[in-house]
Image: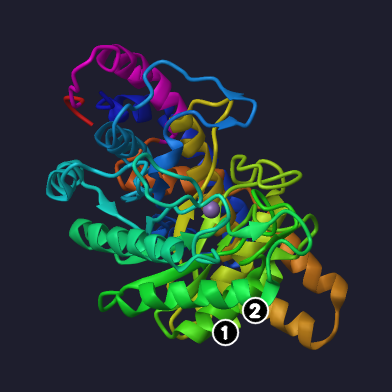
Amino acid sequence: MIDDIEAHNDAATDAHEQALSAAGEVLAPRGVDVDAVIERIQSFEVAVPSWALQTGGTRFGRFPIEGEPRTVYEKLDDVAAIHRLTRATPRVSLHIPWDEPDDAGTLRAHADALGLGFDAVNSNTFQDQEGQEHSYKFGSFAHTDPAVRRQAVEHNLHVVELGEALGSEAITIWLADGSNYPGQMHLRKSFDRVLGGLRDVYDALPDGWRLFTEHKPYEPAFYATVVQDWGSSLMLANRLGPQAQCLVDLGHHLPNTNIELVVARLLTAGKLGGFHFNDSKYGDDDLTTGSIQPYQLFLVFNELVDAEEAGLDGFDPAYMIDQSHNVKDPIEAFLQTVDQLQTAYAKAVLVDRDALAEHQQANDALKAEETLKRAYRADVSALVAEARRRQGGALEPVAAFRRAGYREQVAEARADEGYTPPQSL
Ligand SMILES: [Mn+2]
């Protein structure tokens, strides 16, 4: 289906090579090793979540498009198409039970055939599922009834077991537990109950596995959320032990929060486990990464690259995308997102860290800020495209995707009842 990448790249080669050499002319005199930066970009990988390959919606509705994946197998086919074009998304982050496979071995074989693996698995105790004995209306891990808490723990243990069968090595737990009104929930006791539930899951983790807690300030709980902020998440990770770390979802912060500072603190604590990339204007909007606050994204990557280059002990963040595509074709949005992430990463790699350290030491606020701005303003688009091309990906992923007619083809294949895997990806 997407098998004419070379032809597509050939058509775009002249313009690309001009842009690449122009970028080299700007960067080389600054002492930048352009090839080394391209190699760094090539090393960047990010996981695609199984829950965002269909169009998303809001509480007001959802507007589906033709050719959306109907099964977890078809979702993997779409991730393979994204990976084929970007060469940067070799893993899928599964959501259970939304994408619970009938048989883990069959799903794993399907992923293997597509050249894909599995990143962190995600559990769900924020909504009730059919046939479930107890309701999560008033919480899961934090519920006052031990039977509900037990059910939530059992679900997470099941997700770990399934993840193990798929080759995952981490579980992400986001809890909606909280209260809508003052007095509804005992603030301290509810936290203790969450810690108790997480402890049961933590104790059952296979060797080499990590458990990520994901904080969020509000929604669906509108007064007090138990794992509300990075401080609460860090407390949990510290109390649980070395296999527990914190996941930062860029949209899970109150307006104006200094997220790069949160990242720096979690790095200092050795507890930055993973990321959910997205962007937001007002709340947890799940918009395309870099679409609203690209400078903030760069500043976050600046902290990550600084930690990477400093060789910070235990630095191994699991990068994932967590977006909701209400008005864009989800595959196209992912192609755009990966490009945005690589762009922010490349700009952070360009930061002259020796000069920055000197300006910081000299308390030269202006020169220090300009050092960051200089890297941020650099046009790295040709470097990012070259990184894709060197790995067999597309110079212009969205254009190649549209030209290949993938969406039209799957719209036809997915219109009938039976499942037909794409012939070539
Ligand atoms: Mn998230």
Residue 1 is labelled as none
List x then y, in percent, for residue 25. Answer: 58, 52
| Residue 404 to residue 57: above or below | above
Protein image colouring:
rainbow
Residue 265 is labelled as 2
Secondary structure of the residue carrying numbered label 2:
helix
What residue is drawn where x is 18% and y is 59%?
A: 165
> Magenta segment range?
395-421
List x then y, in percent, for residue 236. Answer: 54, 78
The answer to whether 424 appears left or right of 381 in the picture is left
Q: Mark yes or no: residue 352 visible.
A: no
Q: Is 45 or 371 nearer to us in this picture? A: 45
Q: Are marks 2 and 1 in contact (CB under 8 Å)?
A: yes
Q: Quadrant of residue 103?
A: top left
Q: Quadrant of residue 301?
A: bottom right
Residue 269 is labelled as 1
The answer to whether 331 appears left or right of 361 in the picture is left
Query: 10 Å neighbourhood of mark 2: few (<14), some, or many (≥20)?
Result: some
Q: Amino acid at mark 2?
A: Arg
Quarter that holds the C terminus: top left
The answer to whether 398 appears left or right of 340 in the picture is left
Query: 10 Å neighbourhood of mark 1: few (<14), some, or many (≥20)?
Result: few
